[in-house]
Image (cartoon, rainbow, N blue to C red):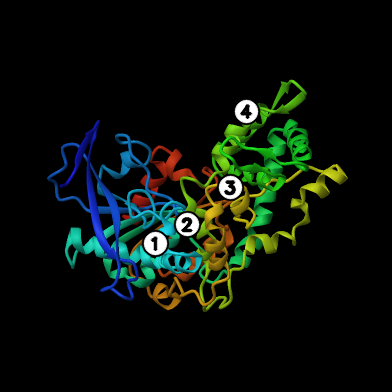
Amino acid sequence: MTVVIRQPGVVLTDHFFQVPLDHGAPEGERIEVYAREVVATGKEGSELPWLLFLQGGPGGRAARPVGRDTWLDRALEDYRVLLLDQRGTGRSTPATRQSLPSRGAAAAQAEYLSHFRADSIVRDAELIRRALLGEGGRWSLLGQSFGGFCTLTYLSLAPEGLREALITGGLAGLRSSAADVYRAAYPRVARKNTAHYARYPQDVAAVRRIAEHLLAPPAALPGGGRLTVEAFQALGLMLGTGNGSDLLHYLLEDAWIDGGAGPELSDTFLAGVQAKLSFADAPLYAVLHESIYGQRSVDPGPTGWAAERVRSEFPEFDAAKALADGSPVRLTGEMIYPWMFETDPSLRPLRETADLLAHRTDWPDLYAPDVLAANEVPVVAAVYHDDMYVDTADSLATADAVRGLRTWVTSEWEHDGLRVSGGKVLDRLIRMARGEL
């Protein structure tokens, strides 16, 4: 039964699709993929073009709308929007510590999850497009962050399904290995640290005090996790969003309380840290993160926990060294480390599975440079000038490699500009795609 929900200004319709687990074996096992159709009230029966939204991640479900919030307000002026829960996320067949044991041991789980990258997401979308629009129908595509990576894969594998593509903060390096990505990322993260400490100089001492406290032993988090120094440093992931520096400062403000035996980390702080560090609601983000960079023609070897390997090249991120020499303790960014599968209870059952994926070799290519060089689909992209999560140099090189791709490079917004700009980022991209700018 089709479920239709009305909210102020919008009509929401549930869609479920059966798709092959392995698109290379279409007669084999099938999984379910969910998508939510959103249309402006009063336009339900109108012949509107479709806009497929691909969420950032990997492993992130589509946003749950409340009326015409954030960028949807602008999109619904012109489109019928489809919010896709990419396979394994949200209401699609889940892939979590609770569901994956049904697949068998770690090796079977890793094999199963090898089908959850961008190429499979794109092939799911193509089946959905045909089901909703018919064989010859084409839709527009909006890809945010990892959704932009998927958009490049879509343009490589099935450009005939697209009438236009809009990308925000998601132009991946077509020929960048996982190690290349992190080698470029650590200096960007260091710059965000410097900017944060310039804005909140008192946080230099605050971070040092917490880091020194955690050297031995780690603190216990409310959900059973362990807050080690390295886990505390991972809060730097917050520094890549528009208000992330401010939110980090406020979190640090609540760090200490006078307990019976003297100062100790407060429950308020520890609960806030847990909310930021836990992968309970998005385990695939951690499990599959480095695999999104695996391509056999770029690097036929394993991704091999690249963020951890490359970190040793940047000793300024060594907390113990910083504490010893009196320098600021630098926080890390969008990096997944093997120790996270020990400190986070939601990831512990997936430790061996993640390690097998990290050591998997010969990942299929996700991009087709020759197809992109001959691209005929209108493509526009917002590139954030000092994006902490996606390297600007990679983004601009990719823009040059995709025929006809137009960029808007801006320092007005951070990586979350699509969400926080009130539709301004999307409006500009739509006008660019129409040739109005």
Q: Which residue is mark 4?
A: 267
For the residues labelled 2 and 3, the Cα–Cα distance comes to 28 Å
For the residues labelled 3 and 1, the Cα–Cα distance comes to 31 Å
Q: Which residue is mark 3?
A: 344
* Circle 1 SS class: helix
Q: Which numbered disc, 1 or 4, marks the residue that appears first in the sequence?
A: 1
In the shown orientation, is residue 73 left or right of residue 398?
left
Look at the numbered discs 4 and 3 and tell me whether their residues touch, using CB distance below 8 Å: no
For the residues labelled 2 and 1, the Cα–Cα distance comes to 8 Å
* Label number found at residue 73: none
Question: In front here: 435 or 238?
Answer: 238
Give the residue type at disc 2: Gly
Q: Quadrant of residue 129?
A: bottom left
Give the residue type at disc 4: Asp
Marks 3, 1: nearer the viewer: 3
Task: Inspect this view and state whether residue 84 appears.
Answer: yes
Give the residue type at disc 3: Asp
Q: Which numbered disc, 4 or 3, marks the residue that appears first in the sequence?
A: 4
Marks 2, 3: nearer the viewer: 3
> Which percent across, then down, holds residue 348?
56, 52
- Label 4 Cα crowd, 10 Å radius (few <14 / some 14-19 / many 20+): some
Q: Which residue is mark 2?
A: 170
Give the residue type at disc 1: Thr
Question: In front here: 261 or 137?
Answer: 261
Q: Which numbered disc, 3 or 1, marks the residue that appears first in the sequence?
A: 1
Q: Which residue is mark 1?
A: 151
